[in-house]
Image (cartoon, grey):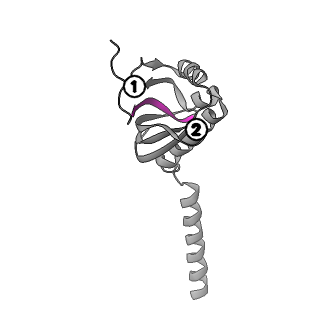
Amino acid sequence: MTNRFGTLAAAALAALTFTGSALAKDPPIKQVIDAGHQRFVQGFKQGDAKMVASVYAEGAALLPPNDHRLEGRAAIEQDAAKMGKVNFEITTTEAKQLEGTAWASGVYKILAADGKIVDMGKWMEVWTQTNGGWKIWRDIWNSDNPAAPPKS
């Protein structure tokens, strides 16, 4: 009887373990966002504007400093194409998820070919869950460099 109980308990434990792993949730949102940023960085390093834009939702908007708002993935791709190859470092310092929406913030660096920092600052994004996975919905950033003086 003891042997039968032990076998039954082991089978139940194995079933729970399998069910738990089979029903495992998506990876934590920070991992998802970091993977999106890796794709963004790789796209800019290669000068691949389409790859950069693929991280954004169709109705996404960029809110760049000292410039107009860019609406939609096509406009984001065109803007990335104008920038060409850029070497970014992006660090996510916090990320939170609430159902199909997430937000994240962090810091960035833009590096010259010799590795010197050209610009650095902070960013904040809102992400949305789409049929194609998590995508950036809104993206805003600010440089830590002093603002340029007004033109007179």
* In this rendering, position of residue 123 left or right of residue 33: left
Task: Say which of 99 and 10 sits in front.
Answer: 99
Disc 2 designates what residue? 41
Q: Position of residue 72 (x, y in %)?
A: 51, 20
Q: Position of residue 77 (x, y in %)?
A: 58, 22
**Region rendered in magenta:** 133-143
Q: Residue furthest top?
A: 152
Q: Amino acid at mark 1?
A: Pro
Whole-Å distance between the Cαs marked 1 and 2?
A: 19 Å
Let me know if residue 138 is in the magenta part.
yes
Label 1 packing within 10 angstroms: few (<14), some (14-19), many (20+)? few
Q: Secondary structure at mark 1?
A: loop
Let me know if residue 74 is in the magenta part.
no
Quadrant in the rendering for residue 49? top right
Residue at the image point whose x is 54% and y is 65% from the top: 16
Quadrant in the rendering for residue 143? top left
Q: Position of residue 53 (x, y in %)?
A: 57, 27
5 relative to 133, above or below: below
Q: Residue furthest front?
A: 152
Disc 1 designates what residue? 65
* In this rendering, position of residue 7 left or right of residue 152: right
Q: Amino acid at mark 2?
A: Val
